[in-house]
Amino acid sequence: MFNRIEDPVDAKMSKMMSKESYYESGEEKFGILSTSLYNLFNLNPVIRKFYGFVHEDLSKYGPRTLLDIGSGTGTVLLRYASDHNPEVALGIDPSPFMVKYASKRAFKLGLSGKVSFVQGSSRYIPGNDKFEIITTSLSFHHWNNRLNSIPYLLSRTDGDGMFVVYEITGRKGFSRRIAKAHLMQRNEFETISSELGINVDISEKNGFIRAAFRMKP
């Protein structure tokens, strides 16, 4: 399992970071109420199909070590860990309420020994572990500093590891109000790839998109 903060430098950095500092200015923050509402949001038929899309894609890769950034209430990791029994499954979220909620879900499902949830962000991952795949689902569109976060996350991948983003491009039945805040398109990922000089493999299916970033050889 994930071995939480052992390195003295990493521990010092953790102490320096307040709960608020896990967020960039302007990024969406989740408190007690919004965390509960987010879990209800996950019951939306489109969102449930989206997470099916994510699970199917991750299952093709079959990573033994997996990190989920913006893990929220733990949906992606808990389903993956239940089906595939990875060696390491770690969820990072800036919200202490999301971390607490996801940890309770893991306990209820009997997965506490397989999945861990801790506070962190796309700019700060506690510990020194590296992962075969780092992923994020319905979170990337909120990030304000993507061009700095992606190289950092790729530095925490192991060997030929990837950083994989899952988002929604458009879906019938997805309300306009929700869609306006959550949609991302192929050209946005292509622009990021070009600006960073990083390879990206993009695939789309039924209004959902996957963008897998790798460092160029």
Image (cartoon, grey):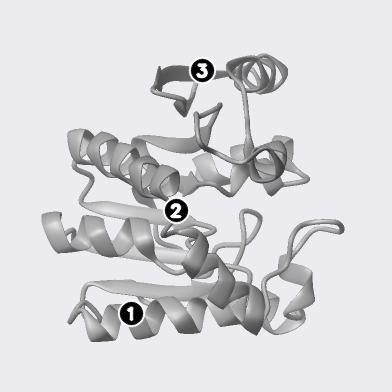
Q: Residue 171 has which mark?
A: none
What is the three-letter code of the residue carrying label 3? Asn
Residue 105: which numbered mark, if any? 1
Counting residues from the N terminus, which is met first, the one under dot 3 or under dot 2? 2
Looking at the image, do the residues carrying marks 3 and 1 touch, with CB atoms under 8 Å apart? no
Cα distance in 3D space between marks 1 and 2? 19 Å
Mark 3 vs mark 2: in front: 2
**Residue in the picture at 52% in, 33% down:** 168
Q: Is residue 78 above or below residue 123?
A: below
Q: Is residue 8 visible?
A: no
* Residue 162 percent across, percent down from the top left: 41, 35
Q: Residue 1 location in percent, x, y?
A: 26, 73
Give the foreground label among 1 and 2: 2
77 vs 114, nearest the viewer? 77
Three-letter amino acid code of the residue under disc 2: Asn
- Residue 85 in the image: x percent, y percent? 13, 61
Residue on which the image places disc 3: 199
Q: Position of residue 116 (x, y in %)?
A: 35, 74
Please tell me in which quadrant of the rendered image residue 182 appears: top right
Q: Is residue 173 above or below residue 113?
A: above
For label 2, the residue is 44
Decide which of 187, 162 is in the foreground and name it. 187
Residue at 72% x, 18% y: name it. 195
